[in-house]
Amino acid sequence: MKNDGCTPRACPSSEAPVAGATAERGAPLLQLGRRPPDRRAILGASVAAVAAAATGSGCGNHRFDAHYKELTDEDKRRIFERIEAETRARTGVDVKISAPQPMDGVEFAYALDLSLCNGNRRCAEACARENNLPDVPKFRYIQVLEMDRGTLDFENANAYYEHDEVPVPGKVYLPVQCQHCANPPCVKVCPVTATWREPDGLVVVDYNWCIGCRYCIAACPYFGRRFNFHEPTVRPRDINPDQGYISNRLRPVGVVEKCTFCLQRTRVGRYPACLEACPTGARKFGNLGDPNGEVRIMLERKRVYVLKEELGTLPRFYYFYG
Amino acid sequence: MSCKKTSPTWAVAAGLAWALGAAPGCDEHDRHAFPAPPASVAAETVTVEPRTQLLPTFPCSSRCHSARESQPDKRLLTEFHTFRNTEFHHGDPAGWCYQCHSQKNIDRLVIASGELVTFDEAYLLCGGCHGDKLRDWRLAVHGKTMGHWTGNKIRRSCTGCHNPHNPTFPHLVPEAPPVRPEHGERM
Amino acid sequence: MSVFSGLGTAAKEIVRGGRIYYAWVALLLVFISLGLVAYVGQLRNGLGMTNMRNQVAWGFYISNFTFLVGVAAAAVLLVIPAYVYNFKPIKEIAFLGELMAVTAIVMCILFVAVDVGGPANLWHLIPFIGRPNFPVSLLTWDIVVLNGYLGINGFIFFYVLYKVSRGQKYSRILPLILLSIPWAVGIHTVTAFLYNGLVARPFWNAAILAPRFLASAFCSGPALMILVLQLVRRQFRIDIDGRALTKIAELVAYALAFNLFLLGAEAFKEFYGQSEHIAPMKYLYLGLHGHHALVPFMWTALTLNVTALMLFLVPRFRNNVKLLNVGCVFILCGVYIEKGLGLVVPGFTPDALGEIYEYVPSVTELAVSLGIWSSGALCFTLLAKFSIPVFIKAKQFTLLGEPSE
Ligand code: SF4
Ligand code: SF4
């Protein structure tokens, strides 16, 4: 795929020294005419051109990429190659973009043993590295809430605790991330279907399609989503080159992102990064369709607690006391 | 199941319930409507993470214990094992090495039945008292599982996480918290 | 042909004007440029230039949007007495209500546009080219009804103007005018449902929200109307029947009383029940865990609203133009706080996991909002400037001093 004259320098958003994301904002609008015409471009160009001109950030033809669900294999190959090339040009890192497909008969679910979690936050950090989360601004997909023993009260919880050692006597810990609801309120509200629930239960976002209205953030009862208010920056040496198109690839500013249960790992049979990093073994992951899977067995044998069950969101994230 | 996929709840919310006929009976999600198992559930192979090779002074017999007599009675340890005197916090404070280590073969553990097991099979020993935990561990509900959820699983043994002489899970230094959001252009 | 000549006349009308007019337009243009500069900064650096964060994902822009939907919806308050009850004094000025609706909707659309993170992706909302999530997402509903409302009122306004300028009757579009009444209720209800449907936010997820929206809209919109009508009366030296103003004021009084009643009902439920859902209410009126950025504003709003209610309930007060105007300003400020930041921010404070991030608008947000309000004012000024003379010429208005019936 050609570089549409989109040098990193031409793009205002990549002036930052190591802008980790926005691999795909590049070409000034003038270059539009030189783009190989495609379906989307013809339809959307006139409209988007106005918008892009208005924003002055008409860099990168991702403005005209189709929705993920409408991409043919050929489209995917082309777009992935383009993203790889742009990432290489800007960060010097060779990344590989992929889009592994859901497996038949698989619905993912997570389980977390609250009696084991000691609040060490290894999960949140491993997640950040796996999923290319920026360190500036430093947000995490997993909020580990510290609560007083004997309560389960969000309002008096603290996600920003700093201690020399955990667990602290008298405290309990509740890690919260996207619960991959089976009835996800965030998906309903999206005005452009930029977020949806995949057949295997993963709730994902198409970063090229999201308009950044943040309605989904308002709708999520679990603080499961993050918006890129700032240009996300990842140090090149921290970039995980194994990237999924709808999961951990570098995100542009102005879109919403979230935990995907490490789609790029779990769809090829691996465990999520947070699970592998957890030193206490509190985290369990598996296929609800497999009667012998870890999560099904846990559901059958343990008492389960689901966050805000009364909201009817049907989380696929179960807390239990082992 | 089909209800779950084509739930009309949104339609209700959008005031369209009547228009769409409201598919009676479908607005209840079945909380345990798990997908049908895959045509071939991959055969699961569980490997217990071996421990022996990680023990720095193994084999104990040839390294040191060949040169000394075993002492069946509790005493204050000297030389190599002195730190165990204060470290030991497990069950009966009067406990002694040979409750668990075999006096006959110091490279083995001895379980309740009198059988000897290797350090890789320590769970058989631990399970002698902590039967409930052993059961959960076998089911992968307790303990850490790695590898692939699709079938090839690696299970960490009891002693991979717990120090058998002082099994309370160690305290850890937590990773730094996320940064609180701030006003202004600062991030 | 006549359309073109009409445009020519309009252009001439817009350029002509006194010193105050020019100063006013120049001031607005300055504000608009300020807003543009701020907006370009926001585009280049991301929405981080605002004070919105993941914890409080919507702020000043959406607050203004919500308030303005109310203003737009309130245009019906002029249409109902004018066309349904044929109340002549208001019929004369009903087109100004339509004009205000148009302006308010334009501002609404601008406020939503500046709030999104990827304005260049907005084409994804367009049917066939994009993938609008209709009818599932209430936001798509809102886009449909707002644009529809803009279309209806814009069309009515220009059609009536055209017909009046040619001395013809415009009764043929009466059905459309009548349609705009339920449509106005619709835009406000849909906007309320936008918040109402979110189970994640107990402060919004209460059935009282939509009625409260309507009640407060029927306070603020007409209050603004009363003020604007007097300005128009002064500027164009036309007679606007005082009875029209007091009639509107009377409607405002009922709406205000109802709005306060609903607020009381809400407060009772929260404070008597003391469930955890009381937190946003506490944050608004008492402060929560040492955070009380909005407390002074909310009490100001409440005081203003109650005072205005007193002024409007007593006929002697509301027939006094000075007091009437004071009341209108009070209501505007009160509702602006209550249905703006006072509605949006507590939905997010505390957030879904109990965290409190205290939101106050940033300089960028204030500047961009000022720019948008100024564009709205400019739009209204220009449209009024060229349309009112047409109505005057067509003797739609009685000029100042003559009896009105
Ligand atoms: S936790 Fe939030 S983001 Fe995740 S699926 Fe549920 S509603 Fe959506
Ligand atoms: S922020 Fe993006 S994903 Fe979320 S609702 Fe808006 S368009 Fe959809």
Image: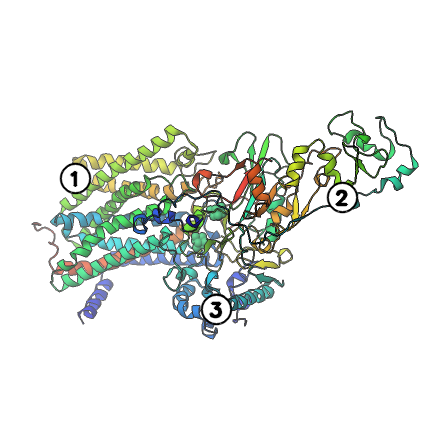
Residue tagged 1: C319
Q: Amino acid at mark 1?
A: Asn
**Gap between marks 2 and 3 measured at Cα:** 59 Å
Answer yes or no: disc 3 within 8 Å of ligand 2.
Answer: no
Secondary structure beneath label 1: loop
Residue contact at pointers 1 and 3, CB within 8 angstroms: no
Answer yes or no: disc 1 within 8 Å of ligand 2.
Answer: no
Residue contact at pointers 2 and 3, CB within 8 angstroms: no
Considering the image in quadrants, where does the N terminus of chain C appear?
A: bottom left
The dot on residue A28 is 3
The dot on residue B51 is 2
Q: Amino acid at mark 3?
A: Pro
Task: Using the rendered image, report if marks 1 and 3 lie on a common chain.
Answer: no
Camera-nearest label, 2 or 3: 2
Q: Is residue A161 above or below residue B2?
A: above
Question: What crowding class fits label 3: few (fewer than 14 Cα within 10 Å), some (14-19), or many (20 or more)?
Answer: many
Tag 2 subunit: B
Give coordinates of residue A128: x percent, y percent.
59, 50
Task: Using the rendered image, report if marks 2 and 3 lie on a common chain.
Answer: no
Give coordinates of residue B137: x percent, y percent.
66, 39
Q: Is residue A106 above or below residue B61?
A: below
Give coordinates of residue A126: x percent, y percent.
62, 49
**Gap between marks 1 and 3 measured at Cα:** 60 Å
Give coordinates of residue A223: x percent, y percent.
49, 44
Report if residue A214 is visible in the image: no
